[in-house]
Amino acid sequence: MPSLFFLVADYVFFENSSSNPYLIRRIEELNKTASGNVEAKVVCFYRRRDISQSLIQLADKHAKDLEEEKESPTEPDLSEKQKHQLRHRELFLSRQYESLPATHIRGKCSVALLNETESVLSYLDKEDTFFYSLVYDPTQKTLLADKGEIRVGPRFQADVPEMLQEGEADDRDQSKLEVKMWDPECPLTNKQIDQFLVVARAVGTFARALDCSSSVRQPSLHMSAAAASRDITLFHAMDTLHRHGYDLSSALSVLVPQGGPVLCRDEMEEWSSSEANLFEEALEKYGKDFNDIRQDFLPWKSLTSIIEYYYMWKTTDRYVQQKRLKAAEAESKLKQVYIPTYNKPNPNQISVSNGKMATMNGAAGPGPFHTAGGGRACESCFAMQSPQWYSWGPPNMQCRLCVSCWMYWKKYGGLKMPSRAEGAEEKTPPSPAATEMRSRGHTLRQTSHMVPVRNSGSPKSSMKTKQAFLLQATRLTKLARHMCRDLIRLRRAARRPFVPINCGAIKTCRPTTASTPDHSSAPTGLYSSTRPDGSSITFKAAQLFSPFNPVSSLHCIVLVEMLLLSLLNISLSSSVVLLPFD
């Protein structure tokens, strides 16, 4: 990656993990810390893989609605591969800021608001290009349309009526179409109009002197005259002159009615000093997002009032002073930073040792390209040769990517080709922590047959990667633990699980078979069982259970049935009869 100068307002790749995709951020500020390092204050952008599945469905519905609103859609039918790769180019803007070390910058990229007039395929044709149309709130877990939406399309076009033919009468009601506010061909001269405006300002100054609240806000004559010279006074004077047919005497009598002079105040005079401070604080936080300013800081003000105050506030000396202060602060801050070439080896890179590549999926081969050998090919493009391989996914799965697919994974957060892995990734919700660096891919889930299945596209796994095993003892071994304690040393057998049990000693207790079932002739302490073919078998229970170690009747029944199933292969449907002990 070439060495670059990175400026404020650049869109850049940040690397926070050697195996995770790059973070996409926009540089807002570059600050030098006390230790001499450079930190970048950045705006966060989120990928589709970083938000929940419900919000992804909402974003897809929003895109579908925009497509349906177009009268003549010009988008060609996209292939599955193009749709798959376009999902990797979609981002979600956020209002979240964070500070990251500038040394983690790995390159520049381009992020633009989705332009409805352009084809979405144009984003695939450009390298390192992304688009966004929605704003993601990581705290509230919501998606909103961006306020800077470009209003193009038939929804925002005026309906132009057909042109009237020459001599054709216009039947429309002109009063409903427009209102005339000033006649430039009035009988008054420019000098007479200017004199009338001077009188209107004087009346406004006198009215403020008589008003108690205004005299507190503008205690001096100079301040009152400045407030009376604002546009609100001039607009009122010209409107009064137009309504009275440009008759100066009639208009003057309206400016000074019987009750006293007319006082016209705008938003700058209506707002208190505390409200003005709140507005400046909100403007510093949200910029010109007046809806958020009204919602969080000034809910008792109307949106019209806030916008009108903003444009009047820009004409004040306070705005000029703040602008100069910000300019001085900007001069003291860094405007660009130089990041040298990052050439440290990636830990996921499969190294070459002793002239041979380290085995991964059975891969080994001489020459500049390492072949896959008997193992897997590239997980994304299925290439068998690459100048360098990178391990990808959980270690127990031993997946890998070629050089080009690895760079695609780092930049776009997915694989080039659609796969079952990424199909499952769309269904996997992310971690609920908003500030946590999340990775939703290649996690493991266990099927009913205890087989690990890859279900997403990240190199992290939500489970332990060690292989689990289960040691299952045979039924004969389980019975031997209870029946033959005088013949088998259980502790010794448990320490040697793969040494076979001495079945000869157990078979010495093998039961004998009788031709007919005769439960009455069976000796006391014997167990009798009837086979499906009508024959019966009996055996002594005194050898199985010790009278000094009594066992419950339920345990006796279970153990006898398990013994019959293991040694004599009697079906579960056969009946087992328990005879009493002596």
Image (cartoon, grey):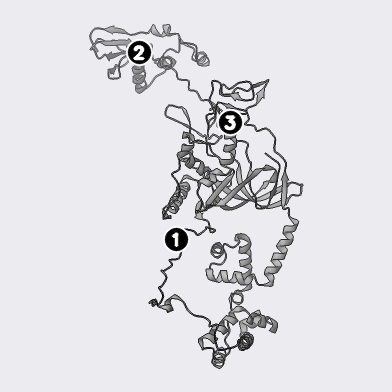
Mark 3, residues whose alpha carbon is within 10 Å: few (<14), some, or many (≥20)? many
Q: Examine the image and state in which quarter residue 103 appears.
A: top right
In the displayed structure, does residue 195 sit left or right of residue 85? Answer: right
* Nearer-the-camera pick, 54 or 376: 376
Above or below: residue 4 compared with residue 116 = above
Residue 166 is situated, as x and y percent measured from the top left of the image, at 41, 75
Q: What element carries label 2?
A: loop
Residue that mark 2 sits on: 541
Residue 453 is situated, as x and y percent measured from the top left of the image, at 47, 30
Residue that mark 1 sits on: 155
Q: Which of marks 2 and 3 is nearer the N terminus?
A: 3
Residue that mark 3 sits on: 402
Residue 577 can be seen, yes or no: yes
For marks 2 and 3, give the one nearer the viewer. 3
For marks 3 and 1, give the one nearer the viewer. 1
Q: Which of marks 3 and 1 is nearer the N terminus?
A: 1
Q: What is the three-letter code of the residue carrying label 1?
A: Arg
Mark 1, residues whose alpha carbon is within 10 Å: few (<14), some, or many (≥20)? few
Mark 2, residues whose alpha carbon is within 10 Å: few (<14), some, or many (≥20)? some
Q: What element carries label 3?
A: loop
> Disc 3, disc 1: CB below 8 Å?
no
Q: What is the three-letter code of the residue carrying label 2?
A: Ala
